[in-house]
Image (spheres, helix red, strand yellow):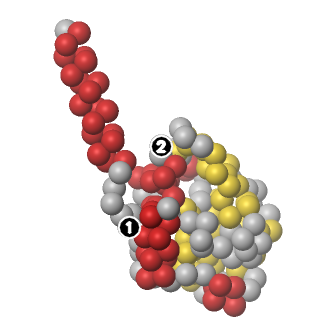
Amino acid sequence: MACRQLWASRAASYLRLSLFNRPFSSVVKDLKYCDSHEWVKVDGKSATVGITDHAQDHLGDVVYVELPEVGKSVTQGESFGAVESVKATSDINSPVSGKVVEVNEELNSSPGLVNSSPYKDGWIIKVEVSDSGELNNLMDSEQYSKFCEEDSKH
């Protein structure tokens, strides 16, 4: 019995290592990206914000997401919350300025959605955008892909 447990432990360790060192993270075309690895999807004056696949991959298993209050003002490039993983705690910076109109309450009970579905179910906040011109300061998918490639070399 002890041999089976040892083998299972080694197999699990191997699988975790091989899954963790993915060569490249997914990037979604119609989103904008920050150099701090947040994404934003804008629809009119409404923006949905989350962290990228690249960010969640480097963080590891997310165990807690600190969400802001609805109504809070956020500023482009400034922290509005945090993501805590088994490895580290990282600030989440807003890619746009505006007012938080919704938070993903599902993350309170299922923070792992940030890992399993960073671009869909793992979104973090929705913001009423105050200055759509700020989107020009962000990267498109092609620029972000190149940024991640360079980041991985260091």
Residue 123 seen: no
Residue 26 numbered mark, or none: 1
Q: How many marks?
A: 2
Residue extending farthest to the top is 1
Report the residue at 23% width, 9% height from top: 2
Q: Earlier in the sequence, mark 1 or mark 2?
A: 1
Horizontally, residue 61 falls left or right of residue 3, namely right
Report the residue at 37% width, 48% height from top: 20
Q: Is residue 34 above or below residue 82?
A: below
Q: Is residue 91 above or below residue 9?
A: below
Quarter of the figure with residue 33: bottom right
Quarter of the figure with residue 75: bottom right
Q: CA distance from mark 1 to mark 2?
A: 17 Å
Question: What's the amino acid at mark 2?
Answer: Asp
Horizontally, residue 9 falls left or right of residue 138, namely left
Question: What's the amino acid at mark 1?
Answer: Ser
Residue extending farthest to the front is 154
Q: Say what secondary structure mark 2 lies in.
A: loop
Q: Residue 22: x and y, percent?
A: 34, 55
Q: Residues within 10 Å of mark 2 (few under 14, many from 20)?
A: some
Q: Residue 138: x and y, percent?
A: 60, 81
Question: Which residue is more in the foreground, 96 or 55?
Answer: 55
Q: Quadrant of the N terminus?
A: top left
Q: Residue 79: x and y, percent?
A: 73, 61
Report the residue at 35% width, 51% height from top: 21
Q: Residue 34: x and y, percent?
A: 60, 73
Residue identifier under label 2? 61
